[in-house]
Amino acid sequence: MTRPSKSKSKSKKNRNQSKTNSTTTQSENSSNCSTPETIPDQYAWDWQSTKSELRERFEYIFQNSLFCDAHFIVGQDTNRQTISAHKLVLAASSVVFLTMFSEKWSTDRPEITVPDVDPTAFKQMLQFLYSDDISLTVKNVSSVLYAAKKYSILALENRCANFLLDQLCVENSFSILIQARLFDLQKVVDASLKVIAGDTEEALMADDFLNIDYETLCLILKRSDLKIVEIHLFDALLRWSETECERKKLVINPDNQRHVLRDALYLMRFPLMDPEDFASKVMDSGILSEAEANSVLLDCIGKSKPQNNKFSKIPRQASLVVSRFQSIVTGGSYGGSPSIHNLGFMINREVSLLGIGLYGCLDHKIDFHIEMKLVEEHETVLGEVAGFYDGSEKIFRVLFHEPVHLGVDIQYQLIVKIKGEYFLYGCHGLDTVSVNLNLADKVTFVFYDENDDIAICENDRGKKTNVYSGQIPELLFQV
């Protein structure tokens, strides 16, 4: 009577042993990610009581690979690792992961292959998703940004962008500009260009200048605010063309340099050069044709016909500023709902509008969310920009992504939406302001209200804008 029972028990034991072996094999195939049945003894203690915050507990289960249900094979060849995580955490942070794990798109494959992401960057991305913490460096930020873009993790993109802004200086401005353009970080692009414009001579000495692409080169040469002598800018252009010839495996000679420069050459302002420098350096380089060189020389002595001028002779200079108000008033704190400010204007000569100045705060850091657009008289939007801005200065700048060309005697309307507390406003505004370019030339702005009868009562001062009071104290432009 006992023998059948013993046999049954033995059979049950064998089945349990087989089940245990199967579980062990499955665990090994899942990158040693622990499950409730296989938690190692060292994790059996009450570690939860030592973690006071949710992110600490999530970080712990990630670092110790507890209860993972998503497994990735990341990287290629020898740099290939299996990395485990939790679908819930990933899907809560990324629409890409959410779609990947949904019933419609999920597959029966136990592991997801990610060959195009560096394993270390993938781990750092996961670390951020679990804890909101990440250790960024100059070396890893690019690969982390790639992972953040791939999985549409905006919070991580912003963290990387802020890191690049914190690291930005003249020496690395081109390196950061390259990364910012690659990953479409417009705020970082604008900041990098501003640094380059502010100290162009030194910035162009960096090796990374030689690594920029053709489009970035044109972006630099188009600017009118570069602080550099034009002949020195030409020297830098020659260095870039030589490097580009090497990249394209071309013999370095004037014809091939001209070939790789293409239309970028016409962004140089040769008429600004000293005629002797032009003759000794530019003409000797062989980059320009004989007809082009002669045209520039005639331009230098004022005998070139306008239709023959291929090269601009507008001086490179910093932006010019139109100041509308004669006084500034501290008007208390204005917050709550966003306020919308309209300002109409016309000009007497063609210029490029770079952006505007807005009032900030004098004594503490404050952030504003700004939406700005420029509309011409036929209601065509010529430029617009939106984002958060640091308003800790008396006047902070809001710039368009690209300068906006303005024509003569055309009615333009600036529309600015401000969200945030602001403490200052202007008064005693001028309806006509002229900015002298030289002894014989000036730009005149005529301001007007869209509605002639607009009036601002005492309680609305600072919250509304017209020609004589309110916000938008400055317009920034170039000729």
Image: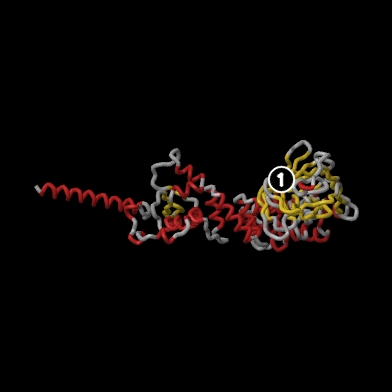
Q: Position of residue 60 (x, y in %)?
A: 43, 58
Q: Residue furthest top?
A: 378
Question: Is residue 20 visible from the viewing direction of this image?
Answer: yes
Left or right: residue 22 compared with residue 227: left
Colour theme:
secondary structure
Q: Position of residue 345 (x, y in %)?
A: 82, 44
Question: Is residue 290 visible from the viewing direction of this image?
Answer: no
What residue is drawn where x is 42% and y is 49%?
Answer: 70
What residue is drawn where x is 54% and y is 49%?
Answer: 153
Query: Residue 199: which quarter of the image?
Result: bottom right
What residue is drawn where x is 34% and y is 52%?
Answer: 36
Q: Position of residue 370 (x, y in %)?
A: 69, 48
Where is mark 1, residue-wise? 339
Q: Residue furthest right?
A: 440
Q: Residue furthest front?
A: 459
Name the foreground residue: 222 vs 472: 472
Q: Secondary structure at mark 1?
A: strand
Q: Mark 1 is on which residue type?
A: Ser
The crowd level at tag 1 (other Cα within 10 Å; few <14, some 14-19, many 20+) is some
Left or right: residue 245 compared with residue 349: left
Name the foreground residue: 93 vs 274: 93
| Number of numbered discs | 1
Left or right: residue 274 compared with residue 130: right
Name the foreground residue: 106 vs 439: 106
Left or right: residue 35 compared with residue 133: left
Q: Position of residue 124 (x, y in %)?
A: 50, 57
